[in-house]
Image (cartoon, helix red, strand yellow):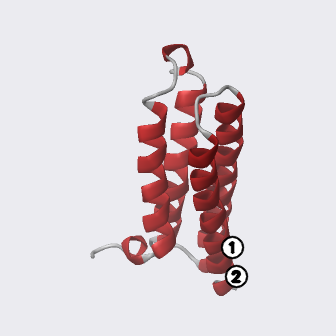
């Protein structure tokens, strides 16, 4: 692979999360298309995009800064999942699966940040 980030497991998991969120939002009501649907999709995409952007040609301090952005976007996805669950757009089991994916990504981002110190 040509780019450093493509080998990072956390980036791969973040891309998987984006795919899952994209599929999930296809079932959201049409009146949410510019609200919750847009917000959760942008947040999910932002996780992998910030990991990718920060990894290439940056200092460790700069990479850590972008990992911080990725972490916050991941947490935003969790917040959106809670809203979707409360609005009955997602079943509890599906919520838990995605929640656990986000938790795993959080742990991996924090470990990567720590390794850069």
The image position of residue 62, as x and y in percent, is: 62, 70
Q: Is residue 96 toward the left or the right of residue 7 in the image?
A: right
Closer to the camera, 109 or 81? 81
Residue lying at 62% horizontally and 58% vertically, measured from the top left = 102
User: From the viewer's perspective, is residue 9 above or below residue 71?
Assistant: below
Closer to the camera, 12 or 85? 85
Q: Secondary structure at mark 2?
A: helix
Q: Is residue 64 toward the left or the right of residue 17 in the image?
A: right
Residue 71 location, quadrant? bottom right
Q: Secondary structure at mark 1?
A: helix
The image position of residue 25, as x and y in percent, is: 48, 33
Residue lying at 64% horizontally and 32% vertically, measured from the top left = 84
Quadrant the C terminus occupies: bottom right
Residue found at the far left of this picture: 1
Residue named by callout 2: 114
Contact, mark 2 vs mark 1 (Cβ under 8 Å): yes
The image position of residue 55, as x and y in percent, is: 49, 71
Quadrant the N terminus occupies: bottom left
Closer to the camera, 20 or 2? 20
| Label of residue 6 in the image | none
Residue 87 location, quadrant? top right
Residue named by callout 1: 110
Alpha carbon distance from label 2 to label 1: 6 Å
Residue lying at 45% horizontally and 71% vertically, measured from the top left = 56
Residue lying at 64% horizontally and 86% vertically, measured from the top left = 115
User: From the viewer's perspective, is residue 86 above or below residue 115?
Assistant: above
Q: Is residue 61 toward the left or the right of residue 45 in the image?
A: right
Residue found at the far top of this picture: 31
Q: Is residue 29 toward the left or the right of residue 93 in the image?
A: left
Quick one: label 2, few (<14), some, or many (20+) residues within 10 Å? few
Quick one: label 1, few (<14), some, or many (20+) residues within 10 Å? some
């Amino acid at each position: 692979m040509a780019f450093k980030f493509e080998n990072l497991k956390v980036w791969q998991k973040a891309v998987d999360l984006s795919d899952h969120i994209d599929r999930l939002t296809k079932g959201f009501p049409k009146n949410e298309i510019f609200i919750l649907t847009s917000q959760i999709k942008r947040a999910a995409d932002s996780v992998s995009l910030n990991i990718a952007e920060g990894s290439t040609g940056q200092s460790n301090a700069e990479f850590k800064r972008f990992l911080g952005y990725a972490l916050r976007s991941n947490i935003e996805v969790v917040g959106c999942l809670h809203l979707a669950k409360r609005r009955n757009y997602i079943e509890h089991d599906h919520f838990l699966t995605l929640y656990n994916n986000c938790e795993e990504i959080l742990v991996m981002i924090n470990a990567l940040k720590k390794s850069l110190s």
